[in-house]
Amino acid sequence: MTDLHLVSWNVNGIRAIMKKDFQKDISELNPDVFCLQETKAQPVDVKKALEPFEEDYHVFTNSSKARKGYSGTAILSKKEPLEVTYDMGIEEHDQEGRVITAEFEKFFLVTVYTPNSGSSRLQYRTTWDEAFRDHMTALDEKKPVVVCGDLNVCHQAIDLARPKQNYNKSAGYFQEEIDGFSNILAEGFVDTFRELYPDEVKYSWWNYKFKARERNVGWRIDYFLASERLMPNVKDSLIYNDRFGSDHCPVAIQLSVD
């Protein structure tokens, strides 16, 4: 069996985080694959920013076509994937560089930056959740799936510091979003962290305002999901909230594959 360390991080701007301790963090975490969300740059700029990693990693990026400096995702892998595809093949949802799918021998790895439902996008977010669920289930018919990224939702009250104040009032904790996440789990996927740590309170995002991180008034909106049949291979699910540089911290799983 081979143990893989898979890491996901919403970097809130790849050019900004590269000026901080990002390279040191990645060196210390030493992921076999790391996935990024909210790179906020065009392909040439993302490629240039990630040049320091090219000696050790194969680099794949997806940027927003609709708005420059917005959204965007990346996958960096020590082992070259069998195939890498971008977006979901649905024009309505393929404008903002939000999905990359990498196929490995034993599983698919999908990184996603789910749209925020703010700015009156809740209805769009609902259609996105349905489309992304279908994308995941289509892959799962071929081989097990690992999904990671900023899913922009807290699924349960334990996943945010102030559930009562935010329920049906704040993006990320509307019932429609909770239902969208539940519908993904109902298709045979598992929230790895909550499965392994059902009672642990830990967050992955803190609002830059109001010193929320210092006071740990946070939200757990960054996830690793896995196909149910892959769960025996998930040895741990981690939230590295001692890593800074973004308003999110990295999350990870330890996955054993033969």
Image: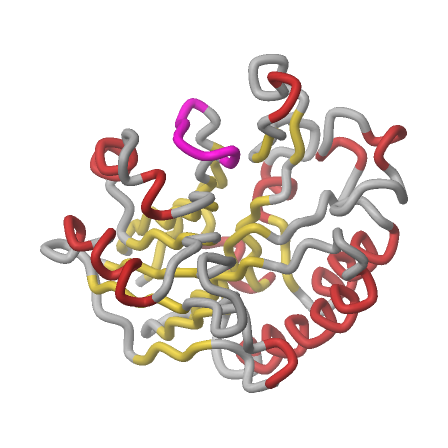
Number of numbered discs visible in the structure rendering? 0
Main SS of the magenta part reads: loop
Image coordinates for residue 188, horizontal then vertical, percent: 67, 66
> Could you tell whether 135 is left or right of 186 in the image?
left
Q: Nearer the viewer, residue 123 or 110?
A: 123
Q: Position of residue 194 (x, y in %)?
A: 64, 40
**Where, by quadrant of the figure, is residue 81 drawn?**
bottom left
On screen, residue 131 above or below 217 = below
- Residue pictured at 39% horizontal, 31% vertical: 245
Residue drawn at (66%, 78%) of the image: 134
The magenta stretch spans residue 245: yes
User: Relative to the observer, which residue lies in front, 48 or 6?
Assistant: 48
Q: Quadrant of the C terminus?
A: bottom left
Instruction: Please identify the quadrant where the N terminus is shown.
Output: bottom left
Q: Who's the residue at 43% across and 43% down the image? A: 11
Q: Which of the 4 image quadrants contains residue 253?
A: top left
Which one is nearer the viewer's eye here, 158 or 100? Answer: 100
| Image-quadrant location for residue 193 | top right
Outermost top residue: 215
Q: Which residues are magenta?
A: 242-248
**Extreme-front residue of the structure:** 68
Q: Is residue 189 left or right of residue 69?
A: right
Please state if 236 lies on the left or on the right of 184 as rendered: left
Q: Does residue 203 belong to the magenta stretch?
A: no
Q: Relative to 95, say whether 3 is above or below.
A: above
Write the residue at 52% across / 33% down.
247
> Residue 218: x percent and y percent?
65, 27
Residue 215 position, x and y percent, is: 63, 13
